[in-house]
Amino acid sequence: MRLILIKIASIILILLLIDKLFGFFFYNYVFKKTLSGELSGGSLHYLIEKKKNVDFIIFGSSRAKHQIDPELISNLNGQGYNAGINGVGGVIYASVMMEIVLKAGSKPKVLILQLDSKHFLKSNENKPMKEINALYPFLSQSLFLRQYVEHSGWREKVLSNSDIYRYNSKAYISIVNYFKRNRIKDNNGFIPLEGNLDTLKLVKPVNNQINPEDFYDLKLKALKNVINTCKENNIKLYIVFPPEFIESINDKDFYNNKLKVFIYKESNSVRVIDMSNIKNLKGLSGPENWKDEDHFNGVGASKFSKSLNDSLAIY
């Protein structure tokens, strides 16, 4: 019996050693050296290595990545970088990225954070774990991320200790982007979309019947972390609500206002630029400006960026 226990313990120790060795070598010799891609951390690494001294940073989802061109944001007086992330670039992701960027020595004067109030709703498909899982390779670098994992259930708290688990689904794309690293040209992070919206495939607009839902507490915590991080580092924070071609949730104004109340309760120095009503944006309501219902194409993104720039001059 004793011999069996010794063998089991030896196997466990060997597996733990393999796990930690994999994490050390993969992070330092592959993942950390990527300069492109999102799940591989390339966008963050590019920002830290190539754009460390930019004056302003843009965080957000694909609705930031493909819609806000730093070159057209002239009223912030300086160079900017769009660090928006497709799919997982919500407020949890932004809070962790901001923490890591500052630890790396970058000190932007301004942060533009793109948000959608619908992504805070508990019924929304963008669950907190979607963002947390994408961030696992940065777990040892981020206090915020470790706090979020603590609120994610015992299973994640246990599994997140495994380096192999942290890179699950990210290893292949990280290796691909590692070999691309020497071909990455200088860029500002903005990627315009091509194509036009097919209006024949649109669904009918939603009605305006109020059906109140709660926000995710963890996402509100992440938003509070962003606000406090900016406050502590003397970084001016602008929060932008972009429009949709057709509103995808009931009572968008209701939830936008609910989120604004939370923001202003945390800090009256934050500036919220609500551009969510497409009817108020001159020249942007036509389908020729849109790639799909959620994203402008390159033409629309240029107009939207200029409109945002005008708003920044006011705020």
Image (tube, rainbow, N blue to C red):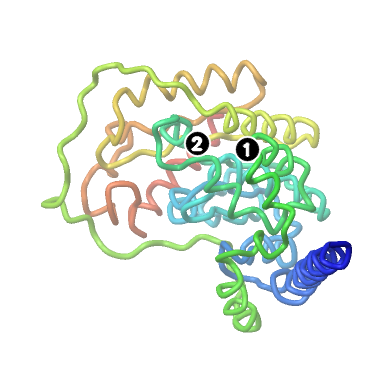
Q: Residue furthest left?
A: 200
Q: Is residue 65 left or right of residue 18?
A: left
Point 75% across, 72% down: residue? 22
Residue situated in front as seen by the camera: 72 or 93: 93
Badge number at residue 240: 2
| Pointer 1 or 2: first along the chain | 1
In the picture, the quarter occupied by the C terminus is: top right
Coordinates of residue 17 in the picture (x, y in percent): 83, 69
The Cα atoms of the two marked residues, 1 and 2, are separated by 31 Å
Image height of 193 relative to 242, above or below:
below
Coordinates of residue 177 in the picture (x, y in percent): 59, 76
Point 25% across, 38% down: residue? 246
Coordinates of residue 135 in the picture (x, y in percent): 64, 53
Coordinates of residue 5 in the picture (x, y in percent): 84, 62
In the picture, the quarter occupied by the N terminus is: bottom right
Point 53% across, 16% down: residue? 261
Image height of 81 relative to 95, above or below:
below
Which element type, helix, strand or loop, lies under badge 2? strand
Query: Quick one: label 1, few (<14), some, or many (20+) residues within 10 Å?
Result: few
Point 87% across, 67% down: residue? 3
Residue situated in front as seen by the camera: 90 or 217: 217
Nearer mark to the viewer, of 1 and 2 = 1
Q: Residue furthest front?
A: 1
Residue situated in front as seen by the camera: 122 or 22: 22
Amino acid under label 2?
Val
Tell me whether circle 1 and circle 2 mark residues in contact (CB < 8 Å): no
Amino acid under label 1?
Gly
| Quadrant of the image occupied by residue 222 | top right
Dot 1 corresponds to which residue?
Answer: 153
